[in-house]
Amino acid sequence: MSLKFIALSGTVSVTENLYVYEAEGKMMVVDCGVGFPDLEMPGVDLVIPDFSYVVKNKEKLAGIIVSQGHEDHIGALPFLLREVDAPIWSSPLVTEFLKDKFKDYGVSNFKVNTFNPEYEDFEVGPFRVFPFRVTHSVPDTVGFAIDTPEGRIFHVPEHKMDQNPVDGMKFDTERAKELAKQNVLFLASDCLGANKPGFAEGERHIEGNMENIAKDARNAVFMTAISSNIGRFQQMLNVAEALGRKVVFIGRSVQKKTEIAYNLGYLKYPASLAVSLNEANRLRRNELMYIVSGCYGQVGSSLYRIAIEDHERVHIQSGDTMIFSADPAPPYSKESEDFVIDALIDKGVDVHYYDLKEGLYVSGHGGQGDISELFNLAKPKYFIPIGGAIRYMHSYKKLAVGNGADPSNVFTLKPGENVVFENGNAKIGEKIQVKAVLVHGLGVGDIGKVVLGDRAILGNEGVVVVIFKLDKGGNIMGNPEIISRGFIFEKINKDFLDEAGGRLKRQIEKKQKVKKSVLHGVTLDYLGKFFFQKTGRRPMILPIIVEI
């Protein structure tokens, strides 16, 4: 008998959480989230984990358990369920988030079992799972104590020890302590705050800080936060009610998630407080608060379109107030968020954001104090940092060793790496090969480094199309025509392109016989060198042969 823990994704990129437990010929997946494209992935919408190992072994898959409702934990589930058929277990709010997401993606082959984390447990194949509440930036976040053939383990993807959270759902230390009375073999837990001394701040002070800003606003107030941060939206609604402003939800993700949370009782406010856009148009601007999706400035989001004056129904004006209750935490999000902030400031908007340090945001991830307290609560033999990056895993390991762990008992895993537990002992297993899976439009995994490289060239260097006209004897008729896009301005540089065409024809005429392969090869080689020599740039060159 043995137990294998596989970190398929989620240990080096902060996002894309996906973990697998294997025992007795069965497999259980914990979370399946998306990541965000970096600056070298033009045209990519999402990055998802490579779950080909799960698909390859889908007959072993007993089920999927979900720890919370953020996209980096649930966003890739629709893609996984296209390939496998397995039941899902989640808490009430997450269940409704999933149903809404599956509807958007047209996924119908799903079964979601809803558990109450305060007292329920359930079986997934050979695993008995005991969920317990933890504090995070979205309600109904849980950790798991899991009984396996090798003993009990703790899996806590994200947490902090806040005992006075806005949503009232504090870390259930009593249940966690009770579950930890049985010896814990290993703890897999959140390492994102392992560099930060002390405990993560509570969130209650944020409401007062937002109100102090909003009460002085002369015109409309706009606020934004991550769309699943229900507790922050509750604070925004409280501010609006205190100041006598009506609330308008803008953006589908915010509208749907707040509607779900309201229907479940996780958001509490008078029904008259929220108004539609049509109703808002009949009110004065100083009577309104807009809660908008797109806090990271994502291209195409409601906030982005408002900032560039491209939103069809919502317009921000000079003298309005904008409050960001979000740090640019996801990788590569700061550039887009900075762009939106600059665009708003340039319009005369009074923008309150992360650089001003006005107490408008706190992390949902625990610091060193929170992590150490979890260590002391679980008292595991082995430690596995998850949900961070290499630097955070390194700090987590130092923290564990500082709390008495043997350095050899802390496993920092890269994607595809795994640990095998047998008879209470642990060893590194054979690595599973994984790769980044990119989603763009309707395509999943059908672009890779070559396509991204081509896109980068097109974006940075431009493209040159070279058109050859051949007569029936295969002879070139006139000079090749050269068309440029994104390389040089064609009208001004027509003589340069004509010169390039003439030089290219003379190079080709030096060849004994003109074949299509010769045309193609000489064009790429000669023009590539010529353009770089003259401009210092290497455009993509596309030869086209037309037979007349």
Image (cartoon, rainbow, N blue to C red):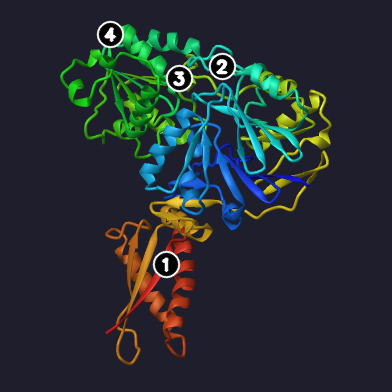
Q: Residue placed at 27% from the left, 25% from the top?
A: 316
Residue nearer the viewer, 391 or 22: 22
Q: Residue placed at 84% from the left, 31% from the top?
A: 406
* Alpha carbon separation for disc pair 4 and 2: 30 Å
Q: Which residue is mark 3?
A: 231
Q: Which residue is mark 4?
A: 244
Q: Are marks 4 and 2 in contact (CB under 8 Å)?
A: no
Q: Which residue is mark 1?
A: 541
Q: Which residue is mark 2?
A: 170
Classify 494 as above or below 379: below
Instruction: Give the SS element for disc 4.
Output: loop
Residue nearer the viewer, 148 or 211: 148
Callout 2 amino acid? Lys
Q: Quadrant of residue 489?
A: bottom left
Instruction: Give the SS element for disc 1.
Output: strand
Question: Residue 533, position in %: x, y?
Answer: 48, 63
Number of other residues with Cα within 10 Å of mark 4, as a class: few under 14, some 14 to 19, many 20 or more: some
* Alpha carbon separation for disc pair 3 and 2: 12 Å
Callout 3 amino acid? Gly
Classify 518 as above or below 144: below
Q: Nearer the viewer, mark 3 or mark 1?
A: 3
* Alpha carbon separation for disc pair 3 and 1: 53 Å
Q: Residue placed at 46% from the left, 71% from the top?
A: 524
